[in-house]
Amino acid sequence: MDSNESDSWLIETDFEQPPQVDLRTDRAHSARVYDYLLGGKTNFPADREVGDRVLADLPTARAGAAAARAVMHRMVRRLAEEHGIRQFLDVGTGIPTAPNLHEVVQAVDPACRVVYVDNDPIVLAHSRALLTSTPEGRTAYVEGDLRDPEEFLADPAVAATLDLTRPVALTLINIVHFLSDEAAHPPVRKLLDALPSGSFMALTAGTADNAPDQVPVGARRYAEAGIEVYARSHAEVERFFAGLELDDPGVVLVNRWHPELGEPSGEADGEVSVYGGVGRKP
């Protein structure tokens, strides 16, 4: 990677005004519903309407969303602190919410590099918040879709930011449960195949295992707004880690994944319908 070329690319991006985009605020979007459940302000009436319907049938949805966000912080912190990872590829970034991934890992090592990938136009509109890297590190935002990894991996910003001959942590937080197995597994495998030995994948996925009556009803509320949700069993979530070496403690409810690495949040298992895990590519 040529440092002069990559620095030039970054300067152009950092000062470029976001292009005019249609935010499609008249229909709900999964990222904005998630933002609403987290108590954020980057959402619109259509998103809040879906969120309220979900909460009416699944009152624990706010606690689950907060737990899923918190586990991302713990996962990437552990990857940086314990496993020495300094490069991160975050696919399905969602609306910027402080602290963002780069802020967590650059607090461990300011030289960490992060590429964010998302296809939501409102994330693009707020992408400047994702480019506030330390001087020693680097961040970039790429418009892309998990279902088409070849396209965003070929984006010049990826090569300008990450060295794909060295270990990378692929983070897929709260994204695969919006895709069927047929749509999710092939691109996840392609992304893992593109990364070298010693890379990691951190993944979270919704489940109905611990709330079999409530979660399917909440999923129907999403579906009524045109957002498909696929709740997976423990075994089905583990399948994403096939061929990887699972980091301790394996695939567990996210409130049980290294809670000692963050502030205690106190969620009970019944409030957290999300599994999470981290695996290493041999």
Image: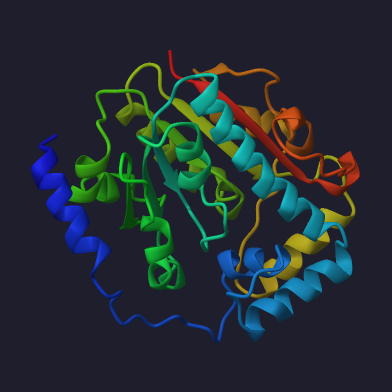
Q: Quadrant of the C terminus?
A: top left
Query: Residue 116, percent across and down?
Result: 39, 51
Q: What percent of the width, then of the height, locates residue 67?
A: 74, 47
- Location of the N terminus by quadrant is top left
From this view, report whether residue 241 is shown above or below residue 253: above
Which residue is at 80% across, 59% downward? 61
Count of number-bearing discs: 0
Tell whether 91 sits left or right of 64. Answer: left
* Left or right of 28 on screen, residue 232: right
Is residue 155 visible to the viewer in this orientation of the structure? no
Residue at the image position 38 percent from the left and 35 percent from the top: 112
Looking at the image, residue 120 sits to the left or right of residue 26; the answer is left
The image shows residue 26 at horizontal and vertical percentages of: 55, 87
Residue nearest the observer in this picture, 129 or 241 = 129
Q: Give the colour scheme shown.
A: rainbow
Q: Can residue 186 be seen in the rendering of this structure? A: yes
When the figure is inspected, residue 209 is found, relative to residue 125, above or below; the finding is: above
- The image quadrant that residue 277 belongs to is top right
Looking at the picture, does residue 52 appear above or below residue 207? Answer: below
- Considering depth in this image, is 153 or 80 the residue closer to the camera? 80
Rendered location of residue 250, percent (x, y): 68, 22
Q: Nearer the viewer, residue 177 or 122?
A: 122
Farthest residue toward the top? 282
Image quarter of residue 245: top right
Q: Measured along the vertical axis of the image, is residue 1 above or below residue 82?
A: below
